[in-house]
Image (cartoon, rainbow, N blue to C red):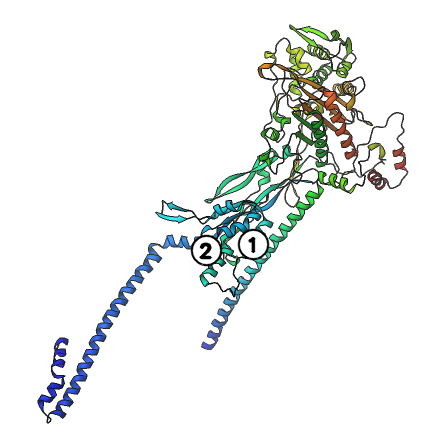
Amino acid sequence: MDLGETARQGRAGGGNGGKAALGPGWRGGLGLVGGRWKRRMGENLKSSVQLRRAVVLSLGLTVAFVGLAYRLVDLQVVRHPELVEEARRNREREFLRQPRRGDIVDARGTLLATSVSVRTVCADPVLIGDQQALVARLLAPLLGQSELELQQKLLPRVRWDAETGRAVTNRYVVLARKVPVETWEQIRKVMASLEPPRDSPLPRAEQRFLRQLSRYAVFADPWEDQMRWYPNQSLAAHVLGHVGLREVTVDGVRFLETRGADGLERTLDAQLAGVRGWRVTETDSGRREVVRLRDQDVEPRDGWTVVLTLDAVIQNILESALAEAMQEHRPRNITGIVLRPRTGAVLAMACLPNFDPNRPAEAPEEARRNVILTDHMEPGSTFKIVVVAGALNDGVVRLEDVFDCEHGRFSYGGRILHDHSPYDRLTVEEIITKSSNIGAAKIGMRLGEQRLYEYIRAFGFGSRTGLPLLGEMPGYIPPVQRWYKISIAQIPMGHGVAVTRMQMAMAMAALANGGVLMRPMLVERLEDRQGRVVAAYQPQMVRRVVSEEAARATVRALKTVPTREGTAPRAAVPGYTVAGKTGTAQKAEGTRGYVPGKYIASFIGFLPADQPEVLIAITLDEPQRGYYGGQVAGPVFRKVAERVMQYLGVPPEPSPEEPPVAWAAGESSGRPWVDSRWQQTN
Amino acid sequence: MVALLCLGFGALGLGYVWQKNQVDRLGREIRLREQRLAELRLQNERLRRQLATLYTPRFLEQRVRELNLGLVPAHPSQVWRLPEPQGWPEPRTVAGRTEAGRADPG
């Protein structure tokens, strides 16, 4: 019997009408049969419904399980590689660990340039919601930006992603770079103040929004950043240079890195920068690192500390004196170099106008140029040391030899040479003392073109000195084949050649050093963070230019310059014998030739003349009040020399009439070095 | 025997959990100490910067002027010099100074 038939039977005999039609005698039997039948029918009906339900359920379950199985296979097999990668990305964090850029210190350890930890402050505009105004009001004073500007940055921006074909909202915006860590801490505190209290009456959704806003909406980039800081501001700015930002990409992450842009910061960038490290780790839902899941941790190697030969105090002495002269003579620029002739170690080097490397962009281009190395000039009379030393070395003249100076007017090669005074007959020594152009020209003629050229090159002109700074020019010394007839008369007095201020100072230093040309030094050593020496640089001799005797004879002549008879009496330093030379060169500009009223005035000298401790070179470009080297550069030299001698504690040379009583006192003391220091500081 | 095995497995399980707990605790400790180290480094850096500012020649000159102590550099002729003891030459740096400081008259 099928289910339809049973149902039909049930319906036919099941009603009260049927029972009544059979009569009362049939009630019991029929009732018994009918109840059993009904039960069976009921059971049949129940089981059929259950069965149907069971079938539907099992079908449903089968479909669901098949769906789940499909999803399982899809997730675990088909999309496995993609999802594994996504899970790793969500969990894993890779931090670049930036090395600390090395410091630059002077020879005494005074900090000249250092790095300060800073952060890049960013925001997630999505988490900020519609609270841009509130966040901007809180952050604007801390970041030093206007509220309006910040509000603009915090607005969410929607863009079309071509790859996914969906609209995406930006979730990363840089609010400020180079924010000091202290300021970042303040920002965190201010943002934390937005978090609602536990018993807040606000709706849950709003509480959750505020919690996310306070915790995650404003954050710092995970990689550390640094800002270069120069505590002495403009001191030695042209030597130190400055840094800039460069965009780099590491493992697909783009960020801005601090790199040297000029000066030693640029040339020693590789040594200062250090080596990056990294850390691969996992974070929890609150972006906190789970240290036990740290995978790779490579420490960065900090940059090396560069120890210079410079001395901050001498640099300050020089810059102060130059600033005073700048105010007094109003030159276009003024430069000064202080160095040790015996080693070539540069103790100070300054150009004015200068700039503050903390804010290089605020200075004009002109002020950022290290004119000591980048600018050519005709040296003028300071160049006479080359021809005189060369001639003395070759033995073609002696200091006592006399030259006819033609009463200040000498016709040669179709031109007339002049002296500033009508000298008659001068010895070689007097030619230096009086700075006679005609005398120097005649010494040059006696030396000869080829030898003069060779000496010029031997003194280092026409080639770079090798200082580790950018933009150094080699100068220009025309080869003998290109000389005009007048060249042999012009070049000995410092015209017709182009040299740098550093070349001129080093040439004079060669004479102070007994005829040996040294390579100028700026970097004494490199040290690691623990102070261990990584590399030490020794003084380098370039070549012997002239014999010691010739150098000594030239120095003897140079000692007469800062005297009453010489051209620079105002360069004399009481207590010390100074040897030096003045220079006054008319400036040539383009096709205009020599321009009247435009001069380069210089004085280069060293002291004590016979045991030189320091050489000082001062050059003023276009001074407005006075233009002779002895008149404008000489006093600056004296001012610097006096203070440097005091600072270095160089004892004055005993004059013949004064007995050296101090030495006798020291010998009887019994505690010589203790007493010596006490005397020096009191 | 079974009880012993169960006990053994139980102990192993507990040991494993304890070990994991220890690793986690140490991880948190490391993180805290690293944070403290970073704070100390920052503080050190701040102090170093302060010291550098205080050492700058310009700042020192300004302080001398402010305090009005009448300090001026001594003229070399005002300084008495005594001979250094023989046999203990101090090492010189390239710049020609002694390592010990500024006492060398050259």
* Picture coordinates of residue A38, whole percent (x, y): 17, 84
Q: For this view, does B87 lie left or right of residue A221?
A: right
- Circle 2 residues within 10 Å: few <14, some 14–19, many ≥20: some
Q: Which residue is mark 2?
A: A91
Quick check: A273 above or below A298? Answer: above
The chain to which mark 1 is attached is A
* Picture coordinates of residue A99, whole percent (x, y): 57, 45
Dot 1 amino acid type:
Val
The dot on residue A659 is none
SS type, badge 2: helix
Q: In percent of the image, x 50 and y 48: which residue is there?
A: A122
Q: In percent of the image, x 64 and y 51: which residue is there?
A: B43
Q: Which residue is mark 1?
A: A190
Q: For this view, does A345 lie left or right of residue B74?
A: left
* Picture coordinates of residue A440, whole percent (x, y): 71, 13
Dot 2 amino acid type:
Arg
Residue A356 found in image quarter: top right
Closer to the eye: label 2 or 1: 1
Q: Quadrant of the C terminus of chain A?
A: top right
Residue B79 found in image quarter: top right
Q: CA distance from mark 2 to mark 1?
A: 29 Å
SS type, badge 1: helix
Residue A360 visible to the viewer: yes
The chain to which mark 2 is attached is A
